[in-house]
Image (tube, rainbow, N blue to C red):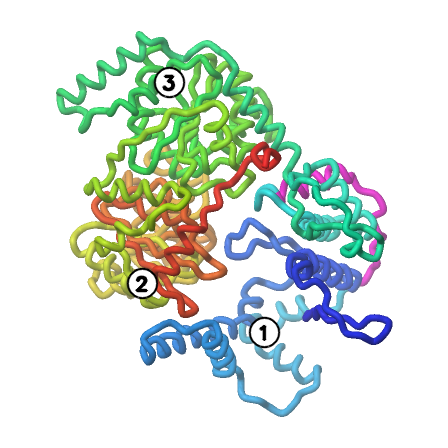
Amino acid sequence: MVVSNKVQDHAGNWKTIDGKLLHRSAVAVSEHFNTRIQAHLEEAGVQFEARTINESKQPIMEVASVPRELTALFSKRSEGIRASLTELRQAYEEQRGHSPDAAALIKLAQAATLDTRPDKETPKSLAEQGKLWRAEALSLLGKDELERITGTRATSIRPVVETVDVDQAARATIGAVSDKRSPWTAQNVMAEATRWVKEYASEHGPLADSLVDEVVARSLDTASVRITPDQVHGDFRALSVGTGQISFEHRTDTLHKSTKILEDENLLLRAGTKTVIPAASMEDFQAAVEDYVRAVTEGEKSHPLDSGQIELARQFATSSKLLAVGIGAAGTGKSSAMGLVRAAVTHAGSRVIGLAPSAVAAANLGEQLGVPAATTDKFLISNNTQGQDPTGSGQIQTPGPLTVTPGTVVIVDEAGMQGTGKLADVVRVVQAAGGLVRLIGDDRQLSAVQAGGALRLLINEIGAPALETIHRFKSPEEADASLLLRTPTAHEADPFSWYKDNNRIQAGGIDTVESLAFGLWQTRLNDGDATVMMAPKNESSQRLSKRAQAYRIETGEVAGEGTSVPLRDGSQAWAGDHVVTRSNDSQLKVKRSRDIVKNGDMWTVEQAHDDGSLTVNHLGHGGKIRLPAHYVSEHVHLGYALTTHRAQGMTRNSGIPILDASTSTSTSRENAYVAATRGRDENVLFVAVDDAQDRDAVLAAIAQNHSQDSSAHEMLAT
């Protein structure tokens, strides 16, 4: 549907509606439109279901009887347009030596649309067109299946639901908004409330329009707190609107946060000042330090700890505060310092549990420290169900390796990537059991998708020891350059200057830089370095992975013939391929049941089976498992390239990231910092330029694009 912002008043004059309001309300209006269409079709007997598309966390409502394959069949032209546009852009760059500007790009897109448009035919009636669509669907489905989908449905008008639990609906709405953004506007809440209504209506029946408005109002009035301050300007009648009201604020500029987030932040701040019994004494800590020094002397440890690592470990092990925080830039040895904490706490007779944002990161943390480790979600579920019978099977949950006991120290790694609510829930669980919480991370790296900012709030309010000596990089100059990129300052020099001066930056159109990045990957692979390319978005990651696969087929490392298995990203996997799993599955056990298949695990395919399953070997610990066909088709991708978000926490000999400053996928400074610090020996940045930008303009845009998540307390204070 196209909506114009031109209107005609009663006098016949044409005027323009505020385009900013329309643009910011587009998602909410779209959800309302879709809700009305769904309600109309449901009255005709059509049933809807929530589906997840491309592993997105946001389900969408689709006609339940239409299979995914049929939807894809009728969406094939968009793929053709994208392929044609890529070819036209490549030809443009080859002929002119630069990327197309905005005007040229529009013309190329129009040309791609025309190139892929079917030849015009004689106009057809709807009935005739329906026959053609039916014939196309029959090419995929059998006649009986198509009849089942398109057959007559019993129509029954379901009664309108007049009452719902508005408070529960408001909590669900704000919970969903919090998982996607922080802070939010009224338009965001309207869109989410409408999505809630669609899902509720598919099961219970349509809701009265007044109930939707009530859910939105309750969400904003009781489940949210306004963080945009009131206007301080006096009256100016010349700017009054028809109602006589005067406002210097745009109605879409008012921001809100959850009242629960404020409560959670207050809990974290109190925990940072609450006195408890320390997990270890100074004598225990000194004994751990002496053991470490002895291990270095005898060659059991590869390097000594610096003074900053020792001081951070001392505070974590011996502090009498319920909650303590530590920070460190990439490569400063946070994991080594946490190992010393574990040694001191263990010497005192207590335990350490490690938590991380992802299962792969948790497994790495557990292996490095030699302690039980899990994702934050798994930890909370495990501790909240002990002593209960969650499945109704009569089996009571018993204490396990993640159980907190008095004196247990829970170390939360990558704390900046954890949402405020989850951190607060961890503190609640640990405090109730008599343990202590220690947060370690970097407030300048990628932050949580959910409402965040807690790590920086705690750093500012209760303080945090910081690791300042970087150990990762082979070049001391690169270590210094990474710190300049990490921390924005007023009137700063170019944070990318060292990378420019040392030929660590290459630029071009996205196709060009993908080719350059792939070329470096080839060189590194031939030198025996199994590095991973990093892309700004999934589409680029998939293209790079397919190119890498084709190269390894040419070299004979991947079969390229015989049995292959289709993957979730649309590619095929043969024996020898590297793949990545995208979903945790506790039923798929590996390494003699000591590990499970996790989101982010990297594997080598040993054999592709005719039934769609894959026998794979873990690239880290070498464990072997046969992944069932249903898991492979839904959760396995080629693994030669990752997005930068997935690469945080990873360390390789060299880093090969692509940075981007296009409108839709702009690389943030935090993202660039993570990408530029994954390699020990070398990090080469490949910069995608677009719309006639040059390299330095793109890098300047990235340097200015630093949007650290602010806590609710910080927002209310501004």
Distance between mark 3 and mark 1 Cα atoms: 66 Å
From the image, which quarter does the C terminus lie in?
Answer: top right
Residue found at the far bottom of this picture: 122
Amino acid type, mark 3: Gln
Residue 75, numbered label: none
Is 170 contained in the magenta span?
yes
Residue 315, numbered label: 3
Identify the mark nearer the N-term, 2 or 3: 3
Q: How far across and how far down the image is residue 306, in percent? A: 24, 25
Q: Which residue is mark 1?
A: 137
| Quarter of the rendering containing residue 443 | top left
Q: How far across and how far down the image is residue 339, in percent? A: 31, 24
Q: How far across and how far down the image is residue 537, in percent? A: 43, 56
Q: Which residue is mark 2?
A: 507
Q: Residues within 10 Å of mark 3 (few under 14, many from 20)?
A: many
Residue found 29% across the figure and 24% down from its top = 308
Residue bounds of the magenta highlight:
155-177
Residue found 61% across the figure and 33% down from its top = 261
